[in-house]
């Protein structure tokens, strides 16, 4: 399946792009992260510490063990600092 | 439902007056909170706010719906800017109307606590020689345990 | 110190903007509370507010001073009207500025709780066939135990 | 001594005037209340239930057993309903 993967804030800066289409068979967010980490150093660095990251699947906050079945959009970003 | 996400500045006074004028019935208590760009460490030239278009509006609407479920409220307004701002510019505001003042206050605090840590905004501080993402504060995450 | 007691209407928007513009330093959080005349029972023609000139200003200044002692605040505004008002007119407002939102919220709630029960104002509701002094509510007195 | 005695809200309405100068030797607020009650029915009615009244001496809220030594102004009124 093809998933739109989005990056924000320093995750975006570290990976060097705001979004990309990713062809994957990953069944969970964590598996998708493993595939991305394996690509290049910049991905490995961005995903080095998952406790410093948050993830949203189809624009809802979720956990890294969340399933990806049917997902169209996955976003990775640091803890939010709005307000 | 009143959630607005915009890059342009807003006028607190005009928003507060319009919000108050729209309240009908017995909504005698109106609370507003406004967040302003402050130069805490010294040397701040600009605050840049990035957000996640689509998810932002969705998250704010969910937070507003939760507030309506938990308190007896009239209208609620959540207005949040993104983009580049100077010190002293207003970043965001919320407004709540209720019959009782406690409901209006608590709902406004709830909205603030949730949007701080659950709405997809990220702040970056620009000084003359650096640009740093603002770190999330543990106390902001801890604030959610109140609700 | 900003305490104002007046019979004339005030403009919430103008007051909120002026209050925000006067904040210096790192006061990033601004809270306002506004009380509006509401017709809860139906048939209200006017709300009349009597006060105790001299003591009113003194009591409000004491309440404001207590807020400054208890929280780290920038400016505080307490504005309260007396005289005759129509439904939907604004009765009073408070505004607080602080570095942290919790301080601004708590101080505003404290000001409201104290001025409700400790500042010498009395409300009388006029309908077409009666004029009744509003009874103090036990819950307003109880609210003071929070602080 | 002469004390300015002020009445507000329904206390003012029941007694029928907003303020008056009272010549008194009362040592406490309670003694002053007793003197006022003895004057006329309207005073007796206004001061029938002290639990429904509040008192300020020289513009500070106080209790009915407060001393009056040096006081210039005493005000009686119902519980406040501001805000």
Image: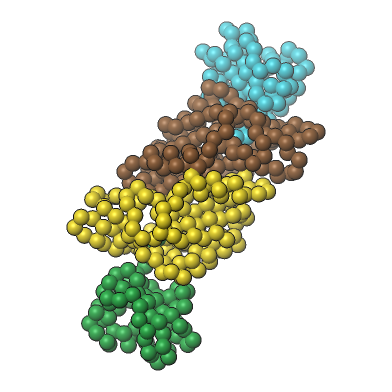
Chain colours: A cyan, B brown, C yellow, D green
Residue visible at 43% across and 80% down in the picture: D73
Residue visible at 53% across and 65% down in the picture: C61
Q: In this view, does A31 lie above or below B7?
A: above
Quadrant where the N terminus of chain B sits is top left
Snapshot quadrant of residue C49: bottom left
Q: In this view, does D47 lie to the left or right of B73?
A: left
Q: Can residue B76 be seen in this view?
A: yes
x and y percentages locating residue B55 in the rendered image: 54, 24
x and y percentages locating residue A52 in the rendered image: 68, 30
Snapshot quadrant of residue D39: bottom left
Q: Is residue B94 left or right of residue C22?
A: left
x and y percentages locating residue C127 in the rendered image: 23, 55
Q: In this view, does B61 lie above or below C131?
A: above
Among all residues in the image, which is located at the extreme left? C129
Residue visible at 26% across and 53% down in the picture: C45
Q: In this view, does D66 lie to the left or right of A8?
A: left
User: How many numbered marks appear?
Assistant: 0
B129 and C137: which is toward the camera: B129
Q: Is residue B25 above or below residue A62?
A: below
Q: In this view, does B129 lie to the left or right of C1?
A: right
x and y percentages locating residue B30 in the rendered image: 43, 46
Among all residues in the image, which is located at the extreme front? C8
Q: Can residue C141 be seen in this view?
A: no
C10 and C41: which is toward the camera: C10
Q: Is residue B103 above or below residue B119?
A: below
Residue visible at 78% across and 17% down in the picture: A41
């Amino acid at each position: 399946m093809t998933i739109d993967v989005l990056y924000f804030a320093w995750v975006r800066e570290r990976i060097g792009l705001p979004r990309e289409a990713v062809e994957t068979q990953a069944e969970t967010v964590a598996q998708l992260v493993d595939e991305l980490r394996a690509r290049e150093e910049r991905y490995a660095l961005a995903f080095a510490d998952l406790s410093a990251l948050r993830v949203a699947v189809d624009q809802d906050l979720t956990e890294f063990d969340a399933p990806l079945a049917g997902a169209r959009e996955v976003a990775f970003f640091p803890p939010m600092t709005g307000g | 439902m009143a959630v607005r996400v915009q890059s342009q500045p807003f006028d607190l006074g005009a928003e507060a007056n319009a919000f108050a004028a729209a309240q009908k019935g017995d909504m005698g208590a109106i609370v507003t909170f406004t967040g302003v760009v402050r130069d805490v460490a010294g040397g701040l030239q600009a605050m840049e706010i990035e957000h996640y278009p689509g998810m932002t509006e969705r998250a704010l609407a969910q937070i507003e719906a939760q507030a309506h479920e938990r308190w007896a409220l009239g209208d609620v307004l959540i207005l949040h800017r993104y983009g580049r701002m100077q010190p002293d510019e207003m970043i965001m505001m919320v407004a709540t109307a209720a019959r009782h003042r406690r409901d209006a206050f608590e709902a406004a605090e709830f909205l603030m606590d949730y949007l701080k840590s659950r709405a997809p905004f990220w702040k970056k501080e620009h000084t003359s020689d650096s640009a740093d993402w603002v770190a999330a504060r543990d106390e902001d995450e801890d604030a959610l345990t109140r609700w």
